[in-house]
Amino acid sequence: MAANGLIIDFENAGLAYGDAPETLSDVTLQLREGEFRFLTGPSGAGKTSLLKMMYLAHRPTRGRFSLFGEDASNAPREALPPLRRRIGVVFQEFRLLDHLTAFENVALPMKVAGINQNQYREDVSELLNWVGLGHRMGAKPPTLSGGEQQRVALARALVSKPDLILADEPTGNVDPAMSERIMKLFVELNKLGAAVIVATHNLRLVQTLGKPVLRISDGRVSRAPGAGGAL
Ligand SMILES: Nc1ncnc2c1ncn2[C@@H]1O[C@H](COP(=O)(O)OP(=O)(O)OP(=O)(O)O)[C@@H](O)[C@H]1O
Ligand SMILES: [Mg+2]
């Protein structure tokens, strides 16, 4: 972990796609160990784009970004995978592999990391049970509903016990009871030490949980009025 407890540290960062004007401008924000933030803003505001910079899919086109205390804006490519492995990402569009079962999808990050199945089999089953899919572990994604696929994606993001959890609209396809259960899981994992950022349009849940809110509008990130916590 970074010596100063900073997990995410953007300084005047900007992101432009190709020759288009910047999608995100002057992003200066910090996330410390143990912090939880919601990320809100209208569709197209740049929530996914900001998360993509955080999980190193895009580098800022301007400014500086440090992740776990390492300068990620200028680091060589080969320095990025070890940083990425410490992040669990719930993608907005799930990104499951259709030819693998739910169990195999969730197990994949562990398998790729070279870990023996004996060491993760129980964790994978437990997580799938927890998200209500214990009876569907052998099913392939095309045979699952949207909400079930979302829950598989959630389990996959969490199986490696990441230091940083980035979730992009993780309750977009599930019912209110499951949404609440998922959000409570993030809160529990946060209590256990993971830093968490959840991008969501679900303002009811945001209000219920009372965590600080970052809002993106007009390409800029600001602290939402009334929400606690420092930027
Ligand atoms: N790969 C890309 N190339 C060009 N433009 C992009 C790309 N990805 C996103 N954009 C543009 O960047 C802007 C922000 O998109 P982004 O997906 O970050 O928004 P969002 O806040 O996540 O929206 P939503 O709530 O609909 O998920 C949009 O105008 C989008 O068209
Ligand atoms: Mg998005």
Image (cartoon, rainbow, N blue to C red):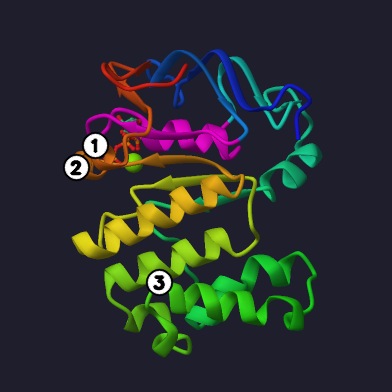
Mark 3, secondary structure of its residue: loop
- Ligand 1 sits in which quadrant? top left
Q: Is residue 199 above or below residue 99?
A: above
State the residue in front, 157 or 231. Answer: 231
Image: 2 above or below 102: above
Q: CA distance from mark 3 to mark 2?
A: 21 Å
Q: CA distance from mark 3 to mark 1?
A: 23 Å
Q: Are marks 2 and 1 in contact (CB under 8 Å)?
A: yes
Residue at numbered disc 2:
204
Q: CA distance from mark 2 to mark 1?
A: 5 Å
Quarter of the picture holding the N terminus: top right
Mark 1 Cα-neighbour bin, 10 Å: few <14, some 14–19, many ≥20: few
Q: Secondary structure at mark 2?
A: helix
Which residues, given as a range, are shown in magenta? 34-58
Image position of 71 (left or right of 92): right
**Which residue carries the number 3 mark?**
131
Residue that carries the numbered disc 1 in the rendered image: 207
What residue is shown at x 40% (from left), y 87% (from top)?
136
